[in-house]
Amino acid sequence: MASLQLRRESSMDQQESPRSPEAKLGMKVEDLWGVQEPKLSPNEKLNACFESIPVSAFPLAPQGIEIKSDASLAEAVQILAQNKILSAPVVDVNAPEDATWIDRYIGIVEFAGIAIWILQQVRDISGTFRWAPFLALQKSNSFLTMLLLLSKYKMKSVPVVDLGDGKINNIITQSAVIHMLAECTGFHWFESWGTKKLSEIGLPTMSPKEIIKVHEDQPVLQAFKLMRKNRIGGVPVVESGGKKAIGNISLRDVQFLLTAPEIYRDYRSITAKNFLIAVKNYLEKHDKRSPMLSGTVTCKRDKTIKELIQTLDSEKIHRMYVVDDEGNLEGVITLRDIISRLVHEPHGYFGDFFDGVLPLPENCRV
């Protein structure tokens, strides 16, 4: 009875204050949380709540950024960089107005593919596609489906299509989900999970020896090669002969190899450390609000998941490095790691869901 009263008072407080679209969504979860079977575990309750909410309830992205199929790679990089996004759908300029979404879009271009272009000198922009046609959700699919795709199935973004007009209605990213969670502070369902310490929920998932990293004196291209080989979004740069991180290089940073002349001239030989210095100097001239200027953000194992989410959201970063008392690296926590601790995949949940995403390229992640 006391917990029920607490939940009601919390919901009332949330309703009385100005709410963001993300918090209003959190309120829907709160209402569903209160009617779940008492015998269910907190994780099972969350699964049931998210399965009951359609993905169409997720707040729309500020604007739908699309890249035309006749765009050059340089133009694609500029569009992604200017809009501070990791990927965008590519629309076929020859598609008729009444085309279905499968015929309208020919793939997704993302920084991961652009990194491959730089490493292999692929000439055609189609070589940067994640897949074609790409996997997308319908507006009626559940929130749980979306969260599982962003976590267990390693998708960094999930397009949501409107079958009626044959266009993408929304693109939900890992960052957008983390922002939603940050806006849900105070709700009973979030606090029951978010107040746990990282070590209590098994984060970080790796040991210090398993951290994929690049040393400061190695070529920066080695960082992108490691990201491509291990299908990860970023690596820490560690001091030579030590275990402390001096910075972070992510897939998004591949843009500087193409847009910053002082970096592009030496991109095959510039070291990871000098790359970080050059990027910092470039941003101080062109984008002083960039999160990259705030330095490496770290935390310790005794942080709560709520504190971690709030920091990731406020700093607009995609990973947090866990360190010991001496500042030595102990692990990495990504946005995907956090979402994967929020929900789990029921047995046989997807069934033949992926059968409609053909043809898929060999070694596709999904």
Image (cartoon, grey):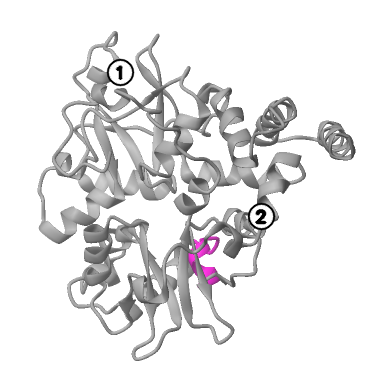
Residue 306 disc label: 2
Residue at 38% across, 12% down: 163
The mark total stands at: 2
Residue behind mark 1: 101
Residue 148 disc label: none
Q: Nearer the viewer, mark 1 or mark 2?
A: 2
Q: Nearer the viewer, residue 79 or 345?
A: 345
Up-down relation of residue 266 to residue 328 (above or below): above
Type of secondary structure dominating the magenta stretch: loop
Q: At label 2, which amino acid type do we have?
A: Lys
Magenta stretch, residue numbers: 287-296
Position of residue 351 measured from the top left corner of the image (x, y, whole percent)? 33, 24
Helix or strand or loop: what does disc 1 sit on? Answer: helix
- 77 vs 190, left or right, is left
Cα distance, mark 1 to mark 2?
A: 38 Å
Q: Nearer the viewer, residue 343 or 82?
A: 343
Q: Reading the chain from its start, which is encountered first: label 1 or label 2?
A: 1
158 in the magenta segment = no
Q: Nearer the viewer, residue 198 or 11?
A: 198
Q: At label 1, which amino acid type do we have?
A: Trp
The C terminus: image quadrant? top left
The N terminus: image quadrant? top right
Residue at 26% across, 12% down: 99
